Amino acid sequence: MSSQVFVVGVGMTRFGRHPDKSVKELTREAVEQALADGGCGKTDVQAAFFGNSTQGHMEGQDMIRGELALRSMGMQSLPVVNVENACASASTAFHLAVNYVKAGAADVVLAVGAEKMFSTDKARTFSAFDGAWDVHDTAAGTQRLLDMGKGVEPPPGSKSPKPYSVFMDIYASMGRLHMRQYGTTQRHFAAVSSKNHKHSVHNPLAQYQDPYSVDDILHAPPITYPLTLPMCSPISDGAAAAIVCSEAGFARLTGQRARAIRVLASVIQTGSDRPAAAFDRHLVRLGSGKAYEQAGVGPQDVGVAEVHDATAIGEIIQSEVLGLCEPGTGGPRAERGETSIGGRIPINPSGGLESKGHPIGATGLGQIHELVAQLRGEAGQRQVQGARIALAENGGGLYGIEEAVACITILGR
């Protein structure tokens, strides 16, 4: 068994709309970058884990998505495992690759996630999310969401007449609960969104690269209160990949050892039955506790983080349950600039899902791509100075009143 696992190569397409590129082409672009970055040939890869969530729904391609995408680029005669775990598919693929290496089953393993979600048929795109919660419990699930948001009345005209993902209603209910419990305001959510859009200006791989002020975001078209359009992640296409290896595997590659990043912890956590306001029992609080213990660090040691901000509400909740700030302080800290680049704990320097984009089967590896660049000191104008420990949190689906699953990854120089 291997005691240490390294990320030696990463690759990522630009996230956005790619109507002329297939899942296979996006996969090829990200994987070839990762191979080149790690000094790795295709034949060096001994196994692959392929994350994807919507290709079956969007294209009717089920069951063998990874085998097809990788064989089309000349990678064959190796174990391929298809991974579908909602928006946490790519980080789950990474987790499985890491543990495959740890178990001694292979020395060099590929984790890749790819997704094509954009379609001119918007109803088809948004219906891709309908299966990410319990389809046999929709009436009770809807009532739970309404109950969560009670006590904060949405103003007139704060709901979009246009179609959007059911998950925006879910996040809005979580946000209204947070507002009721901690006094968080819509302006706090806008401050998070403004910060992330400003970060993405310096990310050439981000779907959006335009800055927005807090007031711009507050006056943007509404989605569902307290969310406005720039506070929400867009529909995206894209792919991201990472090469992970053991000491023995690294010895066979030509990549520079100084650029290798250690995997300190990788944890998958599912939720449990709890009251909606019991954030101390949130699945990310439980999973991150395991990850900190595994890594031998605490939240105070984290120098940079990428968290799952499918909406700005998500970033505030995750920053608190990860222990990066105290409960109820995520919004004010963002408004004061503490989570911006140059602040106390920079969160989502990539622009996050809100601005970098959210091709759900690739998102978690997009986070890994950003954090590897940060720890290497290769992030350019969005570089977080002095970061030696980095954390990624990537959630997916809904069960009850929280995500169905979350992956927490801690990386170190």
Image: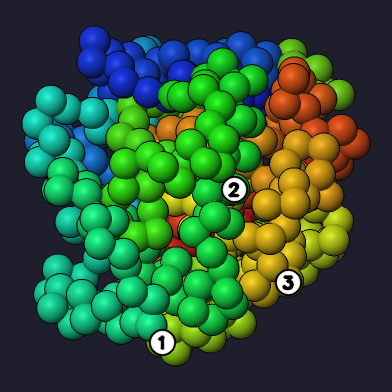
Q: Amino acid at mark 1?
A: Asp
Q: Quadrant of residue 352?
A: top right
Question: Residue 346: horizontal and vertical position, in percent?
Answer: 74, 44
Q: Is residue 237 left or right of residue 78?
A: left
Structural crowding at the residue carrying mark 2, measured as other residues with C-alpha within 10 Å and reported as few (<14), some (14–19) or many (≥20): many
Q: Is residue 146 left or right of residue 161?
A: right
Label 3 – label 2 distance at C-alpha: 18 Å
Front-most of residues 407 and 257: 407
Label 1 – label 2 distance at C-alpha: 31 Å
* Among numbered discs 1 and 2, the one appearing first in the sequence: 2
Tag 3 residue: 326
* Among numbered discs 1 and 3, the one appearing first in the sequence: 1
Question: Residue 191: horizontal and vertical position, in percent?
Answer: 59, 48
Element class at badge 1: loop
* Among numbered discs 3 and 2, the one appearing first in the sequence: 2
Tag 1 residue: 273
Tag 2 residue: 191
Element class at badge 3: loop
